[in-house]
Image (spheres, grey):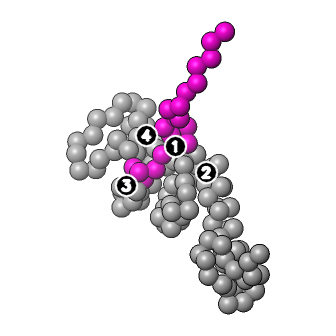
Amino acid sequence: MPPALYCVKTGLKYESKEQMLTLRRENDNKKQKIRYWRKKYNYDLTLDDYEKFMQINKIIKYIHKYHDLLIKYNPDAEQTFNKEELEIYVKNHKHFKDALPHIDYIRTLKLINQCEPNSDLITITF
């Protein structure tokens, strides 16, 4: 049985019980935020995405509904929008401009329902 202050993930010992509890609390906080963001914004996030998503979560709350439009949006090129897209762009122009510095990261985000399906399909015949 490992010692009481042993961390299985890192393979090191904590210096004190307070350090152990503090690190656990921080890790639990991160995981809870990721669960909340996954549920609220429908993005497939992991612990690796925490720092980047933390920087843009105030912008994402306004533009997560228009993820597909934002992916197509290119400020340097000439844009062609249909009527619905133009209406969305005009209403959210400020938020789109705020998202431009982070557009590369936003394009890497996947929506949960758009994740690649499991290729191991089972066929059942009766």
**How many C-alpha atoms fall within 10 Å of the one at disc 2: few (<14), some, or many (≥20)?**
some
Q: Amino acid at mark 2?
A: Arg
Please identify, in this view, whether the residue under mark 2 or under mark 4 is nearer the observer. 2
Q: 83 and 55: which one is in front?
A: 55
The magenta segment is 106-126
**How many C-alpha atoms fall within 10 Å of the one at disc 1: few (<14), some, or many (≥20)?**
some
Q: Percent from the top left, x then y, of residue 110?
A: 48, 46
User: Looking at the picture, does residue 33 appear above or below residue 111?
Assistant: below
Task: Tell me the residue at 39%/59% (across/down).
Answer: 102
Q: Is residue 117 magenta?
A: yes
Mark 3 and mark 4 residues within 8 Å of each other at the beta carbon: no
Question: Which sits earlier in the primary sequence, circle 2 or circle 4?
Answer: 2
Q: Secondary structure at mark 1?
A: loop
User: Looking at the picture, does residue 12 appear above or below residue 122?
Assistant: below
In 3D space, how far apart are the residues under numbered discs 3 and 1 (Cα atoms)?
15 Å
Q: Which residue is mark 4?
A: 68
Q: Amino acid at mark 1?
A: Leu
Q: Which residue is mark 2?
A: 38
In 3D space, how far apart are the residues under numbered discs 3 and 4 (Cα atoms)?
12 Å
Q: Secondary structure at mark 2?
A: helix
Q: Secondary structure at mark 3?
A: helix
Q: Which residue is mark 3?
A: 103
In 3D space, how far apart are the residues under numbered discs 2 and 3 (Cα atoms)?
19 Å
